[in-house]
Image: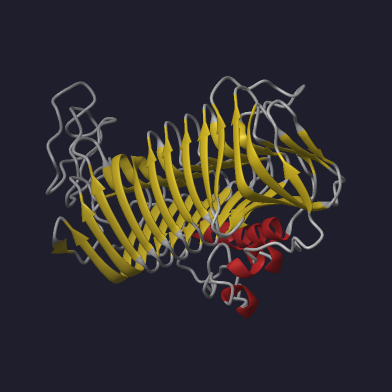
Amino acid sequence: MNEKITKAQAAIMAGLLTLSLAACGGAASSSGNSSTGSTAASSGSQAQVTGSSEVAASGVGSAVSDGVMSTADLFTERDMVQTADTSSAKQISVKDGENVSITEEGVYVLSGSAKNVTVTVNADSSAKVQLVLNGLTIQNDSAPAVYVKSADKVFVTTAEGTNNQLSVSGSFTPDGDTNLDAAIFSKDDLVLNGLGTLAISSSANGVSSHDDLKITGGTYTIDSQADALEANDNVLIASGDITIKTQKDGIHAENDEDNAVGNVYVAGGNLTITATEDAIQATVAAQVDGGVLSLKSAEGIEGTYVQINDGSVNIEASDDGVNATAKSTAYTPTIDVRGGNLTIKMASGDTDALDANGNITISGGTVDISAQSAFDYDGQGTLSGGTVYVNGEQVSELQNSMMGGGMGGQGRMGDMGGQGSMGGQGRMGDMGGQGSMGGQGRMGTESTSKTA
């Protein structure tokens, strides 16, 4: 793992510090007011970050002023440039069984069609390498099509008007202690951009980075058996047209060793994700500042802290629509909706549209929920702005359906138990051993409210 602290990590760490301090003051509670209770995200003590006109001019839009993350800090000017200067580029035409080795900084134009070829970047740790895909097709049995072994940052840029395909169909062969498990595999920062198209098919992950993975342009279709887009640090999307079909997670960011990373940020683009598990999963924070997201999965968006500031998010889920759970100690688990349009359609059964093992706060935007259980939270539920519909009717408070005692609205009664009392409008559960009236059953409860 690269040990450097990037601008993206520094910006996120600052946001995490201030928001985690705010979260301490809004710790989980079941007795808050449904319209005025404070939450980890509504105290106003977050890091203040500002937009960059330079970045905004590149098509991302202005950054959110008080979000966890900001485009001004996460994307460099070069990240946003969708074409490469190929005047002095090296031209490479791939051939069957002949691996390509790139050891120096520069621009490389790759074209042709071949089988069992790996383009390996093994350059100095300060090198910036740009791979321009100019009608490239690679079909491999057991190795990545692109393998970034060492560099500072690698750009994979699709040339305008070109169609490119990278596929791996068999079991990946490790490189020593490195488990190569993606069609594009990088140990360092990776940027996908361009004006062309790239189709990726993989028997494991689609694209994997051990540092940051950024997408700032281009058209992508990814069909993977494991995670489609994966990073140890952060997955950051500024723009692009991305279609994903996966047997696991659509976008996954996870770092077990660092609480400041493991974030997913979407500022724009069109994302269509069909996933067997989570459409978007972040260990720390998942933030949406723009774009059009169409998510169909078991869970739509999951993270410790989920913040939606703008954009259009449409979720069809069979488990939870949006889930804030303690995957990191950086935050009190929180769902924070400040703007945009969030539409959630839940499958029947034991499902929740907005499920937080902490707090839910809605202060702006439009939330339209179709579900048996709209809100499930362990802490406070706050509705201070925006417009919220549940099954076609506008609501003025977030009625909880979590376990606990007291009179409640839309609360689910558990299955026979001991602790707590009946929920007012609670849904009767199944008769059983841990149930109706408490125990560990769920009952109705009182509504609470880098340089380039």
Compared with 107, 60 (above or below) is below
Residue at 29 percent of width and 67 percent of height: 366
As rendered, which of 255 and 42 lies closer to the eye? Answer: 255
In the picture, which quadrant includes the C terminus?
bottom right
Percent across and percent down for residue 321 are 32, 47
Residue at 39 percent of width and 45 percent of height: 273
Residue 27 visible in rendering: no
In the rendered structure, the answer to whether residue 226 lies left or right of residue 143 reads left
Percent across and percent down for residue 23 are 52, 57
- Asked where in the image residue 7 lies, by quadrant, the reply is bottom right
As rendered, which of 322 and 21 lies closer to the eye? Answer: 322
Residue at 50 percent of width and 58 percent of height: 240
Percent across and percent down for residue 396 are 21, 67
Residue at 78 percent of width and 63 percent of height: 87
- How is this picture coloured? secondary structure
In the rendered structure, the answer to whether residue 17 lies left or right of residue 218 reads right
Percent across and percent down for residue 430 are 14, 28
Seen as rendered, the residue at the extreme bottom is 53
- Asked where in the image residue 436 lies, by quadrant, the reply is top left
Residue 220 visible in rendering: yes
In the rendered structure, the answer to whether residue 259 lies left or right of residue 444 reads right
In the picture, which quadrant includes the N terminus?
top right
In the rendered structure, the answer to whether residue 312 lies left or right of residue 235 reads left
